[in-house]
Image: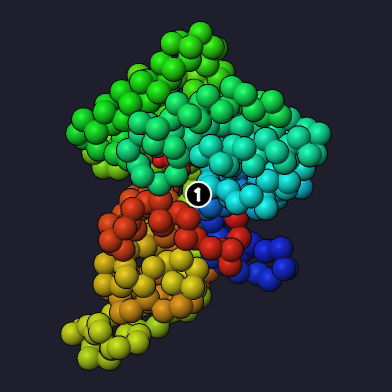
Amino acid sequence: MAFLNEPTISSSGIVRPTYAEIDRARLTANYYAIQQHVTPAKVLAILKANAYGHGLVEVAQHMERLGVPYLGVAVLEEGILLRESGITTPILVLGGILGNQIPLFLQHDLTLTASSIEKLQQIDAAAAQMGVQARVHLKIDTGMERIGVHYYNAEGLLETAVHATHCHIEGIYSHFANSDAANLSYSHLQLQRFNQVLSFYEKRGFAPPPLRHMANSGGILQLPESHFDMVRAGILLYGVYPSDEVQRTVVVQPALSWKSQVVYFKVIQPGHPVSYGSTWQSDHMVRAVTVPVGYGDGYFRSMSGRAEVIIRGKRYPVVGRICMDQVVVNIEWDSAYNGDAVILIGEAENGTSITCEDLADWAGTIPYEILTNINTRISRVYVN
Ligand SMILES: *Cc1c(COP(=O)(O)O)cnc(C)c1O
């Protein structure tokens, strides 16, 4: 356990005891578990939002070493950063695009999402002008109402795509709104709509694009009929289930732990309130420690009065309001010393654990938001 007590040095050279630890071996195991479950479909690894807080470039490099066939990001800038970091695996940018961004996509060999006839025509024209073939996936809206051509209007886009000479139409995809729910009736309706759109190719005697894809983590777990040629694995790759109600048909383990250290120890007298707003006080003398993490790191203030941390294998409550950079933990009459390891998310040697689902419950949000809000002030340390 020596690593727990080692302060980490961030890129700026500043020693900060609070850091996120990413276990690469768990990412590997999660990837293989998903791949095995969906085979012969391929797995596209979703790396948006700093790889769900796990570190965009480092996770991409790890995925590339594993031979992951496709990567996915939300926005152009994420894709460019990966290319500038030497990533050569195909990268699909999932978000909507603006016409003036298209040349940058093409320069960096990023796969575009075409979500309307007009966008596809803009892509084709830009590719023709630059003398290249654009790699394109068509986006069909089957019930998310976010981006994509509506399933009931999709034929025009598919027809245009057949004649877009400077586009390699490599994929066609849609996205589930509720695939992590216990009730899958809306997902089945979306799937039926997507299949209806795909029947265009058979009707017209054209080969469909080689990568038909629809499943996010919920679809991977609960809707085998949605795996098609490829699945888009997001939160499941990081070892977290997309909801409480989802069927856990693939076993994964969390890759991220969030750790800190005790930086201050004191005794608090009864009737002496703790932190801003004086919202908490004890009616008896307690020992307390201060831990250098706060809402300025993504440790949400809304968890005040609910959050717990692990010190020496035992869970203790965070008391008083969570500050920007510090929290106070009530250890009653137990002992703790400066430098002791504090687990914010993760598992102690004795098996006591706190999950990002716990933090999500305390904050009134979902695990996705917890992970993607652990911000850049927290250095990422990679193990295994
Ligand atoms: C974020 C995203 C995913 C991954 O979702 P998870 O629930 O994290 O698996 C898949 N597809 C699209 C289009 C997305 O935006």
Which residue occupies the foreground of this view, 188 or 196? Answer: 196
Q: In which quarter of the image is residue 8?
A: bottom right
Viewport quadrant of the C terminus: top right
Is 339 placed above or below 355 here?
below
Residue at mark 1? 52
Which residue occupies the foreground of this view, 313 or 319? Answer: 319
Q: Position of residue 210 (x, y in %)?
A: 56, 18
Which residue occupies the foreground of this view, 175 or 276? Answer: 175
In screen coordinates, is 57 left or right of 44?
right
Q: Where is residue 342 in the image (x, y as percent from the top left)?
A: 45, 62
Which residue occupies the foreground of this view, 122 or 221? Answer: 122
Q: Residue at x 53, y 24 (%)?
A: 159
Is residue 226 something one can see in this rendering?
no
Is 120 placed above or below 68 here?
below
Q: Residue at x 51, y 26 (%)?
A: 158
Q: Quadrant of residue 246?
A: top left
Q: Position of residue 153 (x, y in %)?
A: 40, 32
Q: Is mark 1 within 8 Å of ligand 1?
A: yes
Q: Which residue is drawn at 53% across and 47% down?
A: 96
In screen coordinates, is 360 left or right of 86?
left
Is residue 168 something one can see in this rendering?
yes
In screen coordinates, is 179 left or right of 47?
left
At label 1, the amino acid type is Tyr
Decide: few, some or many residues near mark 1? Use Cα within 10 Å; few <14, some 14-19, many ≥20.
many
| Residue found at the far top of this picture | 205
- Of helix, strand and loop, which one carries label 1? helix
Q: Residue at x 38, y 25 (%)?
A: 194
Quadrant in which ligand 1 is drawn: top left
Is 314 placed above or below 131 here?
below
